[in-house]
Image: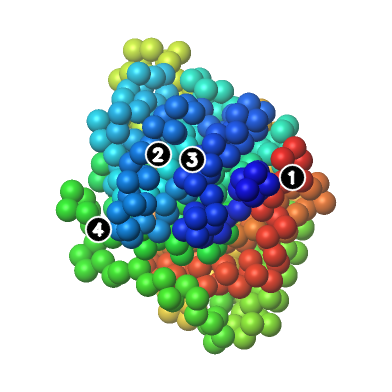
Amino acid sequence: MRHLAQSLPALNAASLAAIIARGELSLAEVAEAFIAAVTERNPQINALIRFDAQAVLSQLPALEALQRSGQPAPLLGVPFSVKDTIWVQGQKTTQGSRLFADFVAPADAVAVERLRRAGALILGHSNSSEFACKGVTTNKVYGPTRNPWNLDMTPGGSSGGAAAAVAAGLGPFALCTDGGGSTRRPASHTGVVGFKPSAGLIAHPVGFQEPLFGNGVIGLMSRSVADLNLLLPVLAGADARDADAPVGLPAYDPAAALASVKGLRIALSPRFGLDVPVEPEVAAAIEQVAVLLRDAGAFVEERDPVWPPGAGEAAFATLQFAGLAALYGEQWRQNPDQFDVDIGAQIEQGMALSGTAVAAAYFERAQLQRSLAQLFECCDAVLTPTTPCTAWAFTELGPNTIDGQAVSARGHAVFTPIINHSFHAALSVPCGLASNGLPMGAQIIVPRFQDARALALGNLIEAALGHAFAVPKWPFG
């Protein structure tokens, strides 16, 4: 039993849930194994910025009562972390901001509430960039998070704490957010699975007001695609408190995630129709994934979306800047030292925007949605890189160059924000290690509410490539 408990941090959620259901380990033994893992590993990476062993253990009586009741509890005893932007009732939640350093959440977010009901165990809060608006994970409250694959590198952002935690075995899955790729890009950089569900699939009416105007969703990271198929039946669904809930929201069908991909039409889009550089090793890894899909009977054809003029990373940022300015512009004026300087720069840009510029950004978003709708008329899914490069130094906003070409600080983020603007679902699945020893990710994009189709494709990729990329060899392997 002791050896089994020591191996738990390397397991996925589905395997861990099965061990608990069979009675091979008690809920207390599982909790203590993960407490030991966090105590040993977290100081090196700063993934969990609030962790209290007693708070973890205090959840056990309720979980043991649930176990005795015999009620359905598919995640009984399975530990997870919560991004520091998502409310957990009675616990501090700061958004990585000094403005909220003493804020205590008055209620659970809907996703947290649903996970509790399914028996999951809250392990702690994971680090985030301030207001989840930065592509690396650092802030003035908790400092930087490091990548478990290489402690000199960033896990990306803004959900870098969640990604580092899952990669390091600090819980088999993590609850996070994705407003422009904040789940998928860190997952790619740390060799785990990252999922941005369709907008509206997981209700999120309880929590902080977000500066993303509908682009942000609850996201998930996990050690395997199979874990997502365990989690989504628990999390998916509307909530009466959600004024923006889609009408006629379809139920999530986990059986569809196990379907064959034979006959699916896949658009291979190596640069997603954008004039941007991609590292050759990343491009080669995506081509390998395309071969795997062809071998499984999918029809794979290189095809790009046709974007409206001016589409690109700079065009996608206007709404975020405006939202930050509306929410925090006054505090920035009064005390700029409270803010991360990079977030302050975004607020400044937002304050300089005219109402006409913000309205134009909404029109541009509608054009992006139409562009992807046209692409999905002739395909069932799109395959792109999740990011055009591997992770970079945690002290930098982004890489200076990609494939030898100078890029902006957001050059690493070009393939993910469009999907937030379009409200589609997208999955990042590990697809190899580059020669620098760092993970790469493939992004599968599907039409809105066809989330299970992304998981079916991810299952195939994961099975073909194995799980070797999900566990860092050092310092935790």
Q: Are marks 3 and 2 in contact (CB under 8 Å)?
A: yes
Q: Amino acid at mark 2?
A: Leu
Other-residue count near label 4 (Cα within 10 Å), few / some / many at <14 / 14–19 / ≥20: many
Q: Could you tell which of marks 4 and 2 lies nearer the N-terminus?
A: 2
Badge 4 marks a residue whose secondary structure is loop
Q: Could you tell me if residue 476 is visible in this image? A: yes
Q: Are marks 4 and 2 in contact (CB under 8 Å)?
A: no
Looking at the picture, how far across and down is residue 45, in whole percent? 64, 31
CA separation, marks 2 and 1? 29 Å
Residue at x-position 77% and y-position 53%: 434
Which is closer to the viewer, label 4 or label 2?
2
Tag 3 residue: 28
Compare residues 321 and 234 and report the one nearer the observer.
Answer: 234
Q: Quadrant of residue 401?
A: top right
Q: Could you tell which of marks 2 and 1 lies nearer the N-terminus?
A: 2
Tag 1 residue: 477
Q: State whether residue 6 is above or below residue 324.
A: below
Badge 1 marks a residue whose secondary structure is loop
Badge 2 marks a residue whose secondary structure is helix
- Position of the C terminus, as image quadrant, is top right
In the rendered view, does 419 fall on the left or right side of 354? Answer: right
Q: Could you tell which of marks 4 and 3 lies nearer the N-terminus?
A: 3
Compare residues 237 and 24 and report the one nearer the observer.
Answer: 24
Which is closer to the viewer, label 2 or label 1?
2
Tag 4 residue: 238
